Image (spheres, helix red, strand yellow):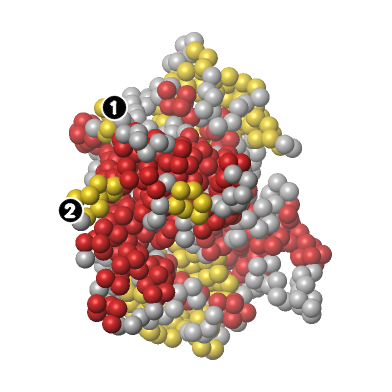
Amino acid sequence: MLLLIQYTLIFASVLTLVALGGCISEHSGVINLGLEGIMVMGAMGGALMLRNLSSAASPFVIVLLTLCAAVLVGVVYSLLLAVACISFKADQTIVGTAVNMLGVAAATVIVKALNTAANPDDVSSAVQYAGTKKAFLVKIGSFEFNWFMLIAVIALVCVFILLYKTKFGLRLMACGEHPQAAASVGVNVFKMRYAGVLISGALGGLGGICYILAGTSEWRFENGVAGFGFLALAVMIFGQWKPQRIALAALLFGFFRALSNVYFGFDWLVNAKIPGAVYNMLPYIISLLVLAFTSKRSRAPKAEGIPYDKGMR
Amino acid sequence: MSENYAIEMLHITKRFAGIVANDDITLQLKKGEIHALLGENGAGKSTLMSVLFGLYHAEEGEIRKDGKTVEIRDPNDANDLGIGMVHQHFKLVECFTVLDNIIMGVEPNKMGFLQKKDARKKVLELSEKYGLRVDPDALIEDITVGMQQRTEILKMLYRENEILIFDEPTAVLTPQEIEELMRIMKNLSAEGKSILFISHKLNEIMAVADRCTVLRKGKYIGTVNVKDTTMEELSAMMVGRNVNFHVEKTPAEPGEVLLDVSHMTVASKVHKNNAVRDVSLKVRAGEVVCIAGIDGNGQSEFVYGVTGLEPLVSGQITLLGKDISHLPIRKRNVSGMGHIPEDRHKHGLVLDYSLENNLVLERYFEPEFTSGAGFLKKKNIRSYAEKLIDNFDVRSGQGAVTPARSMSGGNQQKAIIAREIDRNPRLLVAVQPTRGLDVGAIENIHKRIIEHRDAGNGVLLVSLELDEVMDVSDRILVMYEGEIVGELDPKQTTVEELGLYMAGAKKDEVSAE
């Protein structure tokens, strides 16, 4: 039971972080379909940092440097989307898809190249970080607390305050709803949209490293992040682009994802003799159902997906 | 300089590829006056205002504020000079509150955190002072168009703008709201604000403006004192010829019934009640039947039901003896119905299509335009489009291939009317066909509608403009809260009586006639 809670919380943390990123980007008016790719790249940044750090370093330093690396790579990679979609007014869906495909491929190639350079016989795309990973974990009884749970809560509070209590948030959301209105009162729509995408890059990168650390002590990058970027988008839509609802939606989806890791710990679930694959499919099936039934009522930022054009009235 | 001008635009010339949009135009706004800027669609009013806001840069001419030359590079510069504008299409974020919309751009804040308390106090004071009723905490999407406009005015006042520009402010308002706006504008000018009022509605200019500058086809025609002039003189200046305000027409000679709507009920998209409740009416050949009423009383939904944009909850529609209650839109069209929709952008045109493709939208499938193999006959489409453009005087930058989006509102409307009338439908449903158009274009469209009637067809007109209702129609049906509450003869009724029906103060039992 404790294990179920633990896994639910960690997967919910991943989804919260990434969905909040999507939420900020969409409130600025840019649909960030590239979250999946951004997660992979952020995860790679964090993982490489972890591999190169000595496990003797203080846990605080390890955590901090890893987070910084993931955020940095996430932001830099999301710049690709920002430049294409905002400055060059490219179609956001197509760019997002390209960013996803490139993300997994680039991470695999980079990690393989690094591995081969270090050892010519090593052609795997895996990064090991068994030693340094422990810095993220704190044992509380038999419950394994992960710092990312706290980070997700902090991110949630920050995003909420940012959107609803600050000047920046008011302007950001105006750019996603009615950019011409924002521009007419002197808001620089391009800058705000860049800010939105880059913040989503930072949160996406965090979510990426959080996701791979939830698993084993190494990660093979050709696996990508198993559609968690898309799951996060579903969480965001189910959460109606509102941070507090996104957190609840993330818990729900996190729970179903966790179930596939720990269902064998429940006798009655094992006795039900449902194939394990069904549990693995659950979060994705649930997201499909939830979106099919709720998307009619959903209210996305009105101007999202439309490149800003000064001349349009 | 003897006169005290708040802002002066002197000898402004602005060219676009191929055309001179503003040709040596001078506009001088005195302090504390209401100055009207009058001109037809495409006369250069919008371009001139864009120059004033720094959206375009004039090739020649200068702008002076309080006698000093200033340079305006972008809207922020205009704002710094105290120039504010209520745009024709409001610049409001619909899911924000009134207060958030007012403070956006000049948010009172401490270290980036919003401080809304003082802002709210200031907004309430301003709204009290100028009689601008708003609820600061209401969401824009929930409030009336009139209140949205008051929010826009408060936006300018909150920034302490001294020069207020109103771009076609009455186009979206009900008669009552227009009256209130006129009162507010007079209040503002009495408090020392200078107002520039862009309009093509002569009666409003006569009612509220002190002076009026007229533009025509990009050229400056003149500036006159409103109290020394007449509507006729102004309209002649604007269109370059005398305009007839009264629609010339002979009495109607109703023939056979073309459209027979019986007990029609249509659901509402915004609330749970039905928008149209058990409405019956008939339109005969050779008459113009007008549905009058204040916006939002079910007229739109009634038309959606008749034209097939919305399904019926119950009731029956018969067109030329054929039951069309559940027919799809195209089948209704080919059965003899034409529709000039209320929202020309949403239902009238495909904005990103060329003008020619828009003109054949309802006939492209006919053998004249599509070959047996399913390919479009581009040549025929082009020549057909050019014929319509010619006949209906649709003006556009590149002729038949102009993207519809880049055309002015008046010419977009002309294109729709050309498309619908040329199909020669026995029943023409025209919803606010002259919305946002200038007198020259209105005269032309009214003439077309009457001609269509005289050719033995029926017209169902839906209008919010009382003048149009009284002048064009042969029979008036007043709609109130989804029901027909009165049938009036425009020759025997008055605007006042019509107003009472529209406001729901008077109600008759109307038979399905």
Vertical side of A188 occupied by A153: above or below: below
Residue B453 lies left or right of residue B212; in this view the side is right
Vertical side of A160 occupied by B144: above or below: below
Chain of residue at mark 1: B
**Which residue is at the front of the view, A169 or B195?**
A169
The image quarter containing residue B83 is: top left
The residue beneath circle 1 is B111
The residue beneath circle 2 is A141
Q: How many marks?
A: 2
Residue B391 picture location, percent across and down:
72, 59
Q: Residues within 10 Å of mark 1 (few under 14, many from 20)?
A: few
Query: Which three-letter amino acid code belongs to the residue tagged 1?
Result: Met
Q: Residues within 10 Å of mark 2 (few under 14, many from 20)?
A: few
How far separated are the C-alphas under marks 1 and 2? 42 Å
Residue B8 picture location, percent across and down:
51, 21
Residue A112 lies left or right of residue A224; in this view the side is right
Residue A57 lies left or right of residue A107; in this view the side is left
Residue B98 picture location, percent across and down:
29, 43
Residue lying at 35% horizontally and 80% vertically, measured from the top left: A274
**Which residue is at the front of the view, A220 or A117?**
A117
